[in-house]
Amino acid sequence: MATRTYQHAIECLNSLQSNAAHLEATRAAGNRKLNTAIPEMVAYLEKLGYKQEDLNRLNVIHVTGTKGKGSTCAFADSVLRHLRPSWKVGLYTSPHLVAARERIRINGAPISEGDFARFFFEVWDRLEANTELKFPTMTPKPMYFKFVTLVAYHAFLTLQVDATILEVGVGGRYDSTNAVPQPVVTGISALGIDHVQVLGKTIAEIAWQKAGIFKEGIPAITVNQPEDGMEVLKKEAELVKASEFVVASTVREVIEAKLGLAGRHQSQNAKLAVILVKKFLQRKEGIDFDSVPHDAIAQGLEYTKWPGRCQTVQDPRHPNITWFLDGAHTIESLECCMQWFVSPDAALRLTPSSERRTRVLVFNCTHGRSGPRFLACMLATAAEQLKLYASSEDTHSLFDLVVFCTNVTYADGHYKGDLTAVGIPEDELKHLTVQHELASAWKALAPDFPHDRVHVLPSIEHAVRLIQNVAGSGSNSTDILVTGSLLLVGGMIESANLSDVAL
């Protein structure tokens, strides 16, 4: 390879994505490959020159769940760095918002483009040099997420991190992050009921998947869960002989601290994060659980950042535009999103002139999601919030403009390299199928909403242009809620030139 740039690394990485046809074939095949998932990951590690036990040197806090796991990891990362400022702390999360290198962080910052390219091609080259495939289900290189996980393992081991916060990608039991044989502590955030409906599984089945990260002799920590799910978690912790099973309850630091992440749902994630970090230090350094400094924990919670989740961003180039960014993509997360947005902290905030802001909703959801159900949830939650705050506004007039656009980044039909997605059928994108379905659903749910204020657009850049025209044509300030998809939020940050202030 003549070039070894970050851009070339992203091109190579994108070649490992599953296209729509492959995804459909995988769904049809069911779970036949699951039992070999971890052995395959270990085999790839061996091709890189590592033993599975080498991953124990990463000193892992392993976190899964169906909602809140990313926020929990962000809290844990910040708290641990405030408690141990001299340490080198690795954080691995997914998906990314704007750049793939965001997934691999050192001391809170994404690794540089140069480092990402270096570690990426070291993994790429070693896999190409060693063509032996230990299992018939293996391919010369694993698919996108598994490959990035290998890059993260390689980067953290090379950089000799002192601790690693590792977020599960999907599930837990068969996830590539579960190749770590002996994490220091494991945690499970909330088990969302919405995932039960979307995936067609019971809460017990989902809990069993998540509990797959529990290990013998390792503390297993969780938050309050639905009864069926909690019963499975307890049973699995006993079966694997976890050293203890703890349900996060009241945490003093969370009560006293001002959390850096907005939304009342974040207190539960913060509680889990604090207990995970305290258990980590207890096991690694023998520190008494209750003697960990409260002030440093509170600071860590306050300075936590997790872009694209209940995030308010003032547009640096258009002072009258405020962006409200939340990648919520389930019923429960959209409820939390609307509880945050339709509140005095966001859309209902007061201004010196008491002016009525122009409000815009930009929404998209991925193929297979129930768009009409999502929109109905958002409107219902908005109605509850308006009633809660005794607002005179009507739910259906909460927004002045509604935009349904694809996750395509640019108006010319191209994606920013890091945001390229090949999992959506081409015909669906060409005909804007999902977006027209969403527009029809909105019109049915809000029949009094003017139809000429509902827009279906082919790209995020088209949406940005429309918003800037609307904001520029009036004297009022403009609030834009962007939600329904993390890819949409990431593309909006890119297209609206918000990276400097949002990331």
Image: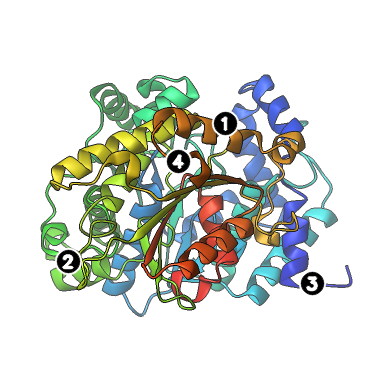
Sequence-first disc among 4 and 1: 1
Sequence-first disc among 2 and 1: 2
Amino acid bearing label 4: Pro
Q: Residues within 10 Å of mark 2 (few under 14, many from 20)?
A: some
Q: Residue 11, which numbered label? A: none
* Residue identified by numbered label 3: 4
Q: Report how far apart the C-alphas of labels 2 and 1 lie in the structure.
A: 52 Å
Left or right for 393, reference 61:
left
Helix, strand or loop for disc 1 = helix
Helix, strand or loop for disc 3 = loop
User: Looking at the image, how many numbered discs can be counted on the residues?
Assistant: 4
Q: Residue 292, which numbered label? A: 2
Sequence-first disc among 3 and 2: 3
Q: Given this view, does label 3 or label 2 mark the residue nearer the observer? A: 3
* Residue identified by numbered label 1: 437
Residue at image position (78%, 57%) is: 12
Q: Residue 450, which numbered label? A: 4
